[in-house]
Amino acid sequence: MSGYRPHPFHWAPAAGQRHASADEHPPGAAVYPNGTEITTLCGLAVEADAGDMAWLWPTCVDCNAAARTLAGVPPLAGGR
């Protein structure tokens, strides 16, 4: 049985930004462990960075736009 998942994506710091990914977390993990390769909603293949400071990185604008579409939320002003 999988855990509660309100949207079909998760946020993950990787490659200097906070990206969104539709990849499942590994069994028993609440986040992508450090070094886990994920495919982002913006189309990159990157390794997750589970460090505390990584969560403060800027959000990838392309992942944010795709995540908002998947969540059924209007785009941000300016279309992103």
Image (cartoon, grey):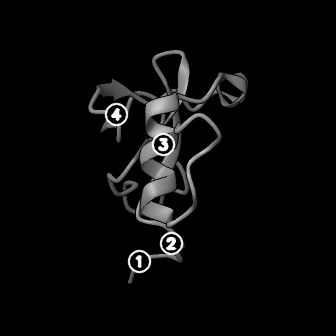
Q: Amino acid at mark 3?
A: Ala
- Tell me the crowding category of disc 1: few under 14, some 14 to 19, or many 20 or more residues within 10 angstroms, Cα based: few
From the viewer's perspective, is the residue at label 3 or at label 4 nearer? 3
Q: At 64% from the left edge and 27% from the top edge, which residue is drawn?
A: 51
Find out whether the residues at labels 3 and 1 contact each other: C-beta distance under 8 Å: no
The percent position of residue 5, horizontal first and vertical second, equals: 50, 72
- SS at badge 1: loop
The residue that mark 1 highlights is: 2
How far across and how far down the image is residue 46, in percent? 33, 25
- Labels 1, 2: front one: 2
Type of amino acid at the residue the image marks with label 1: Ser
Q: Could you tell me if the residues under marks 1 and 2 are in contact, i.e. CB atoms within 8 Å?
A: yes
Q: Residue furthest top?
A: 16
Circle 2 residues within 10 Å: few <14, some 14–19, many ≥20: few
Q: Give the quarter of the image for residue 53.
A: top right
Query: Which residue corresponds to mark 4?
Result: 42
Residue beneath label 3, please? 65
Q: Which residue in the rendered view is the most extreme toward the bottom?
A: 1
- Separation of residues labelled 1 and 4 (CA atoms): 25 Å
**Mark 3 and mark 1: Cα distance apart in space:** 26 Å
Q: Earlier in the sequence, mark 4 or mark 2?
A: 2
Q: How far is mark 4 from mark 2, CA to CA?
A: 20 Å
Q: Quadrant of the N terminus?
A: bottom left
